[in-house]
Structure formats: structure tokens, C-alpha cells
Amino acid sequence: MQIGKAEIIAADLLVSLCIVLTDSDDPRPWLDRLDGFFSQIPDEDVEVLVQCVADGRAEALLKDVERRLKGPGYKAFVSRLLGAAEYRAMLVAAKADGAVLALGVRRAIRAAMPFAVAWSDALGVMSKAQLRAATRFDSEALNAVQIVVQVDAFFGEKVLAALPMQATSATKDDLATWEPQKAPQFMQKFRALISEGTAKKVERANSPLVKKIKGARHALQFSEDGISQAANSLTELIDRIMREAFSHEQSLAWVQANYKDLSRLTHVRDGVLKLTKLGEALCFVHGGGSPVQAPAGADQTGSFVHDVLARVIVNARNKLQELKHADAGTEEEREQLLRVLAAIEGALMLGLSLGRVSADQSDSEAA
């Protein structure tokens, strides 16, 4: 069939990996599943794949397979080679393998939703004017929740519907359609995951600070001046998690090393160069690592995601400063505080995740 050994091994491993990762009956954590899977790959198969990549043949082989599959005479050639019955059996098997891959992709798409909701919540403290100033993209393109829902719906309609998903471990939830117009209704479900995920990340970064988030929620629920108390707790959370991740001197040195335009990131006080909160936040969301290079011609350093998250943290802190003096205890003030809390949790979850990635990448480049 003019398909080499490396392509067959790669396809087999990819399908097998998707089966392992989508097995709902396997109680093992993801890392244990991956460790078990990779430990069972025969050494000779690994050698074939490594040699293929080392020789620079991987991309060429994939393009060659794609060209043959799309060729007008290839299907007829394979049908004559295998015989009609074997050819039909091969198509059935190919669709079954395709269904397994599709299930893995569907779950990967949906695994992105908590991050999309966190991003959407984080942007809740930014005005459209602030978003336009902070990014090089139209603000409509930042609606991550809607994008994920639309991609998920398109994938279900165009891919899953054409494959025998009943042959996989797909559940009803896997196959259920997320309707774009109903996106706001299930966002609350993912906010619970974000709160849990943020608490875990904050705990890993600085375990005592988890109490600040819990204290803010408790104050909102039970205290008469809960809005002011919650705003104080969250302001301290932001200040301490940034300050204890990087000292002022470390953050200042990082900004000076990575940003040419220091006018918006530093100021002089009593003859001493000081960082603005935005400068501190940028160092924090980058994890002290090197900023991602912006496109040529851009008027800022780093990615727009890091820049927006840093601005979100600063904006949220500014709004908290206002709410610290809220003494009316109105429902409107409470709703404002809840929006800021959601924005902080979303920004911290994404910021701590991105900061770790940036730091690890910088360590790898240094090594």
C-alpha cells in the first residue's frame, strides 16, 4: 500500500494513546496512564521513529501519505490490491480508529473550556477601550468561551456525526452538543472548577494565601461589612503573591532587562526608580522568564495574553481599592465584588500557569 513502517507505527501509537487517555474505566491519574503507555512501547519501534525524525523524513512522509490518499487512483489501487472484502474491512477499521482519535480531540477541546471561562472572567474588569489599548487584536476575537463552543459544535457536526462513535468509550456528555446560545448557562459549572484550580495553584505558590480567597468568600457570605473585608483580603492576596514571588529588586531588574519603554512600568519617587503595579504584574505573569517575542513591528514586548493578564491584575486591584471603602453594603456593590473575585481567580489561574511555562522555558534555554 506504499505506506512505510514509521507511518504505521506512528498511527498505531497515536490511536493507542487516545484509547488509554479516553478510557473512562481506568482509575489511574493521567501521568500514571502516560507512564504505563510509554513504558510498553517496544524499543525497536522507538528506534524507527527516532531515526525517521533524525533523518528529517517525518514531515515529508506525512505529506507523501496525504498526497497518495487524495490521489484519484489510489483507492482503486488499494481495492484491487486487497480485494473488495478486505478493502471494506479496512475502511471499517479506519473509521473505528478515526472515532477514537475524534473522541480524544473532542475531550481536548472541552478541556480548554475552564481556561476560556477564566479568560472571559478575567476580562470582566477591563473596558473595551482598555482592551483595545492593551491588545493588537479586535476585542471580539477575545471571546474565548464563544470560540470554544463554536469549534466544539463544528467538530461535532462535521466529524463526530460521520464516525462510529458507539465503538468508542464516548459518554452521552461527550456526544451532547454545546449550543452557542446556551453558553452562559453552563459557564457557572466551570467557574467552580476555576475556583478549585486557582486555590490549588495559589497553595503551591504560597499556601497561607489560600486563606485570603476563602476569607473573602466567607466575609461576603456572613459579615455585615463583608464587601470591605473581602476587598481588603483580595488586595492583600494580589500584593503578597506578587511580592513574595519576586522581590521589588528582582522585578525591577527583570523589567529593565526585557522592556525598552519603561515609562508605563516605572516611576521615580524620592529620587529612586520604582516599579508600577503593571511592571510587577508583568514580571509575575511571566514567572520571571523571558517574554514571548511579539510580532515584528509591534509596539510592545511579549505576548498580548501576558500583557492583558497583567493589566487585569492591576485593574482588579484598583477596583478593590475602591470597594475597600464601600460601606453601603448594596447588592450592586456585592455584584461588583463578585465580578472582581471571578476576574482575580481567572487571572491568577492563567497567570500562574503561564508563569510556570515561561520560567521553565527560560530555564531550558539557559541550560
Image (cartoon, rainbow, N blue to C red):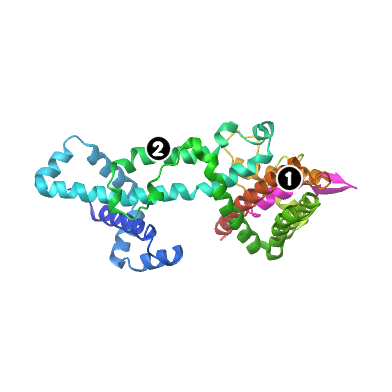
Is residue 22 shown left or right of residue 253? left
Which tag, 1 or 2, sits closer to the chain's start? 2
Residue 273 in percent (x, y) is at 83, 48
Residue 149 in percent (x, y) is at 47, 40
Residue that appears at 25% across and 54% down = 8
Residue 25's place in the image compared with 141, above or below, is below
Residue range of the region highlighted in magenta in the rendering? 267-290
User: Mark 2 = which residue?
Assistant: 154
Circle 1 residues within 10 Å: few <14, some 14–19, many ≥20: some
Residue 272 among those drawn in magenta: yes
Amino acid at pointer 1: Arg
Look at the image and tell me whether residue 257 can be seen: no
Residue that appears at 66% across and 36% down = 134
Is residue 219 shown left or right of residue 87? right
Q: Identify which residue, 278 or 219, lies in the foreground.
A: 219
Circle 2 residues within 10 Å: few <14, some 14–19, many ≥20: few
Residue 23 in percent (x, y) is at 36, 60
Residue 334 disc label: 1
Residue that appears at 45% across and 41% down = 178
Amino acid at pointer 2: Phe
Residue 42's place in the image compared with 313, above or below, is below
Q: Identify which residue, 186 or 92, lies in the foreground.
A: 186
